[in-house]
Amino acid sequence: DEFEMQRRHFLAELSLFKLHPQKNSEEFVELVMFMAQVAASYPKQTTNLPQQLMELLETNAAVLSPTLRKTLAQALIMLRNRKQVGPTQLLPLFFRLFRCRDKELHQLIFRHIIADIAKCNKRKQDEALNKALLGFLRENIENEEEFVSKKSLAIIAEMYRRNIWRNSNAVNVLACGAKHPSSSILNACLNFFLGNEVDDEPDDSSDEEEEEKDMLLRASNSAAGVAGPSKREIYAAYKKGTFSTKKKKQAKLKRVMMTVKKQARREAQGEGQGGIAALHLLHDPQGFADQLFARLSKGAETFEARLKMLQVISRTIGVHKLILLQFYPFVQKYMMPQQREVTLILASLAQATHDMVPPDVLEPVLRQLVNNFIHDRARPEVVQVGLKSVRELCARQPLIISDILLQDLASYKTDKIKGVRMAARSLISLFRSVAPQMLHKKDRGRAVQESLLSNGAPKLQPYGAGEVLNRVPGVELLESDDHASQSEGDDLEVEERSDSDLSSGSADAEYSLEESSDHDSG
């Protein structure tokens, strides 16, 4: 029949094409798409079609024309969507195709892998398939080839963002990216744990794309986090230049606005907190933090990469209450007002502080913070940042500050700058609830002073002291609910008894009335 004739024609063209794979044949492209489209109707005759196309791509992917290479990939995707190819058969081939320098092919394969995994886990989690896929992706992440590792990281991060692989296995496979020698892979891993988007494309952008990235960076650093381009950029896109340049600027503005809206939508859905939630799922947080800190101490990365590493390490220490004593002297080197991104560094220091850190380790850090930021010759904004940082450190570990230092810092409550006054009063209000006896009598407040005279001064718990529980917290609420339900049951029984007494009394009265009426009639 006609199909058999076309199949023989396809096999003949395939054998001829293998002799000259670099030749671009439109007829062969049409035959490949025809065979892929009708393969579901003739399953017996097309049993070997997926294997033939995979072998052709496997052996000649580097010399094939981009059009034919993309057509063969589309045909295999079509066969996979019709379940004529297994989910794990195409994955190794597609990852080898990532080595080809073809951006359209990369986007096609990446979108297919994401959609295929999501489809396999749509109704319920396919644990066996997910385990096999994660094992394969882990091998690729540990591979020294940078682009393949980055694609594997991007796939797992996208599956985590879509709540398909939101488990500890996926997170710990992603954490393997911190061991990779490439800075690009490390940066992608850090972006995931910081809740940022993982970029899966290499950094080979042009000058126009760099301008577009700068525009997006300004938008993301704005106060609202979703602001678009400036008025000057919009005016230049519509009023300045020739028709072709204005058209390019308008297209760039449109892409930027789409990306900004996408970021705003993700922030509204709370997806930016995914990195913090992922840190809770690490199997070995201490080893992860030690490994990152060892790489941070070498200083071989860029300042931006080191800053991200500092943030991830501090969040890991704070979430799991780890002990990494060498981290605090390292941060101490960067605690200067003229340091770039000093506010992020101080925020990382506060995140890494908890009640299990020895006060002896944090006291030199606090002393340097006060000496560098809080003095009479410092600018008001520097003093404000220093006071707020001291408050955050003392809120997590109040044992690191002495009475004399606290009273000196509290004297800034009468400063002429409003921001400094508010920061000092915030520190005073903290110690009114934690240790009011460390403050001056005039700073304690009337209510706190009366409670001190009547109840005595509350003592700060010494380092390492913990509260030992002898019962489950909150069990008293259950007991009160039980008592309330029991009292309601007793009330119901009393009401039922009173109702039954009333009904029996009325019945007796009716019976006596009937007897008296019968006696009178007799």
Image (cartoon, helix red, strand yellow):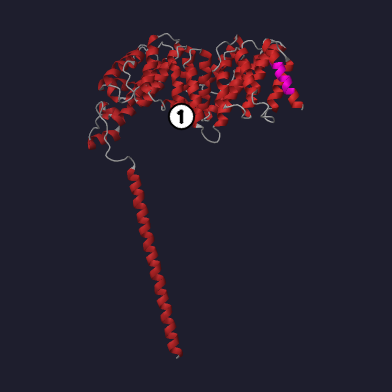
Q: Would residue 101 be found to the left or right of residue 421 on screen?
A: right
Q: Amino acid at mark 1?
A: Asn
Categorize mark 1 by other alpha carbons within 10 Å: few (<14), some (14-19), many (20+). few
Residue 254 in sight from this viewpoint? no
- Give the residue drawn at x 34%, y 52%: 483
Q: Quadrant for residue 117, please give it.
A: top right
The stretch in magenta equals 6-14
- Nearest the eye: 305 or 253: 305
Mark 1 lies on residue: 167
Where is residue 440? Give x, y as percent: 26, 26
Residue 444 in the magenta stretch? The answer is no
- Nearest the eye: 459 or 327: 327
Q: Would residue 303 be found to the left or right of residue 97 on screen?
A: left
- Give the residue drawn at x 68%, y 27%: 45
Q: Quadrant for residue 37, please give it.
A: top right
- Nearest the eye: 173 or 223: 173
Image vertical order of residue 205 relative to residue 163, above or below? above
Residue 54 in sight from this viewpoint? yes
